[in-house]
Image: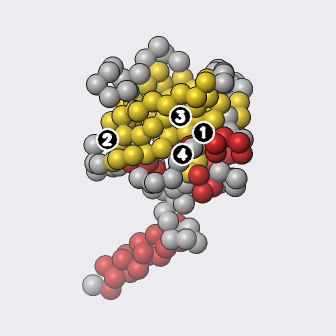
Amino acid sequence: MAQKHFWIVLLCSVMAAQAEPNGTNPFRLPNIRKFYMTRQPIWTLQTTERTVYSCKVDVPRSINKLRVYFQRLYYWHIARVNNTMEGVFKRLNAGGKARAPPDAMMVRIPNIIFTDTERLEYESHDGTCGMFLVSSISGDKYYDLRVWNVSVRRPDRKCMERFHYAALQKRQLYKVLYKDSCQQILH
């Protein structure tokens, strides 16, 4: 009995030692459903995609266990584009866990063919910043650094480092899509 008690205490001690000061577990898997479960706009701050658009933002409208509907807005040159999008959640990397949360979504305009898969590869501990790997049906792959509106001016440092490291590893240049004037696209 004493040996069993010892192992329980040891396990609890290890788990407590691994927890962050805010109580989160640094080994938790990214959860794209939770990332999109917000009323805040989700801005793409930076991307490695070769593009001419700017001010890309996703505004979640409704979400359930299987999917999220959101508005994706951006400026294409000077034209404002506003598309209703559907993201269907899926798990691409279970990390050895049988009941792992979804880490990706297949994205499309509702009732049209899926155009890409967006995988949340890294999520900050507070859940307001994420590094996404976007894979299009054309075979293109690029990274996005996305943040909730609340942290657009001060994104998580580790999250930004992960994005910049991924871009460097793939030898991709990145472009800054967000500036303060982008907030106007929401009105």
Which x, y percent locates residue 132? 53, 37
20 relative position to 163: left or right: left
Q: What residue type is labelled 3?
A: Leu
In the picture, the disc for residue 172 is none
Say which residue appears at 46% left-offset and 54% top-offset.
Answer: 39
Q: Which amino acid does label 4 sit on?
A: Ile
Secondary-structure class at tag 1 = helix
Observer-nearest of 42 and 163: 42
First-in-chain label (4 vs 2)? 4
Name the residue tied to disc 4. 42
Q: Are marks 1 and 3 in contact (CB under 8 Å)?
A: yes
Say which residue appears at 58% left-offset and 35% top-offset.
Answer: 56
Q: Which of marks 4 and 1 is in front?
A: 1
Observer-nearest of 54 and 125: 54
Q: Which of marks 2 and 1 is in front?
A: 1
Name the residue tied to disc 2. 67
First-in-chain label (2 vs 3)? 2
Name the residue tied to disc 1. 185
Circle count: 4
Name the residue tied to disc 3. 73
